[in-house]
Image: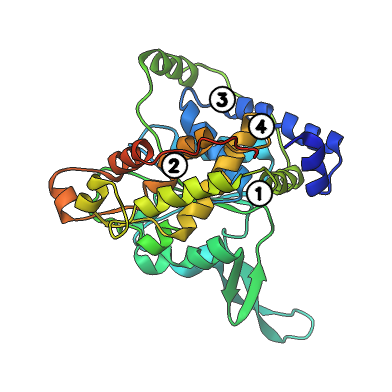
Amino acid sequence: MTIDTLAASTHLDEAEVERLVARLPPLEDALATTIVGQKVALRHLTVTLLAGGHAVLEGVPGLAKTLMVRTLAQALTLSFKRIQFTPDLMPGDILGTDVLEEDPETGRRRFRFRPGPIFANLVLADEINRSPPRTQSALLEAMEERAVTWGGETRALTPPFFVLATQNPIEQAGTYPLPEAQLDRFLLHIALDYPEADEEVAILAATTADREIQVPAALDGESLVALQAVVRQIHASHALLDYVSRLVRASRPQTSTVELVRDVVAWGAGPRAGQALVLAAKAHALLAGRFAATPDDVRAMAGPVLRHRLVIGFRGQAEGIEAEAVATRLIESVAPPTDSPIR
């Protein structure tokens, strides 16, 4: 697909598409102003935004998960709210609540809805597994429908809208693992690892100096919504869609030809995983300056799309096999298409 055909399909002129795409490298550069290393995680975070999805960031304490989301909000000039999930957090603390007001002139009293922190463009659900399921589920409608229902009235959330949740893989005592139905609403599961030695030295130098780093504004909400429309028009051939379908179906032990999946997976990924993988591959292609998704884009995004959608059975748990290893085996075992991605 060429830029002129892409422009026609998105009802934008070529110059506008070029202008929007040219703003993506500065966005990634803006994120790197405060985040040292974690290039793959930052790329996956940008893919999440372009695809219009939500993401879970998981890593041990001190890997800048919260800072990463704060930096993103500054670079995007979006409204930002942080919700610290705790065991006593209630659904109303997230969605909002009715407050009783009195008119000083008439003395009449009435209830008025006071919006909660969910009414923001970018919502950080910090340590989401620290709250019980009732509170976690308060996010479900907002994440899926981009709306909140309270008191019988549905209120739409202003686009763009993203939930970026963080989890700590250690200290599981007193936590409430997210149910599979809610995990499936997250486009990507972004895993953060320890920095390299030189990166850790750079972190020490940057965080102990007497200077404040300013994050440049790289993208506004209107441009981001337009880029999401561009992502939807990135070309994906029938052969590529078939490849995605085969990958997802191979994750299900009932239909898989991959021995590891049949042995250790209790439940594989559903159709939403295929949708997420196609959108993520398209966004990954656009970040590379291409207007057609390729098998390489699919392989690059298959891990973060599948790892939180695979339920490991008792045998796999006993053998210490994690979903990441199963996703890697799937990518290795399912053959990509051999024809051109633009055919």
Q: Amino acid at mark 1?
A: Ser
Q: Amino acid at mark 4?
A: Arg
Q: Which mark is residue 79?
A: 1
Disc 4 target residue: 290
**Secondary structure category for the residue under label 1:** loop
Q: Residues within 10 Å of mark 4 (few under 14, many from 20)?
A: some
How far is disc 4 from disc 3 in space, using C-alphas?
22 Å
**How many marks do you count on the picture?**
4
- The numbered mark, 4 or 2, whose residue comes first in the sequence reads 4
- The numbered mark, 4 or 3, whose residue comes first in the sequence reads 3
Q: Amino acid at mark 2?
A: Ala
Q: Is residue 126 above or below residue 294?
A: below
Q: Residues within 10 Å of mark 1 (few under 14, many from 20)?
A: some
How far is disc 4 from disc 1 in space, using C-alphas?
30 Å
How far is disc 4 from disc 2 in space, using C-alphas?
19 Å
Q: Are marks 3 and 2 in contact (CB under 8 Å)?
A: no
81 relative to 233 in the view: left or right: left
- The numbered mark, 4 or 1, whose residue comes first in the sequence reads 1
Disc 3 target residue: 32
Foreground mark, 1 or 2?
2
The quadrant of the picture occupied by the N terminus is top right
Foreground mark, 3 or 2?
2
- The numbered mark, 1 or 2, whose residue comes first in the sequence reads 1
How far is disc 1 from disc 2 in space, using C-alphas?
30 Å
- Residue 323 in which image quadrant: top left
- The numbered mark, 1 or 3, whose residue comes first in the sequence reads 3
Q: Residues within 10 Å of mark 3 (few under 14, many from 20)?
A: some
How far is disc 1 from disc 3 in space, using C-alphas?
20 Å
Please indicate, yes or no, whether residue 7 appears anywhere in the rendered image.
yes
Q: Are marks 1 and 2 in contact (CB under 8 Å)?
A: no
Disc 2 target residue: 302
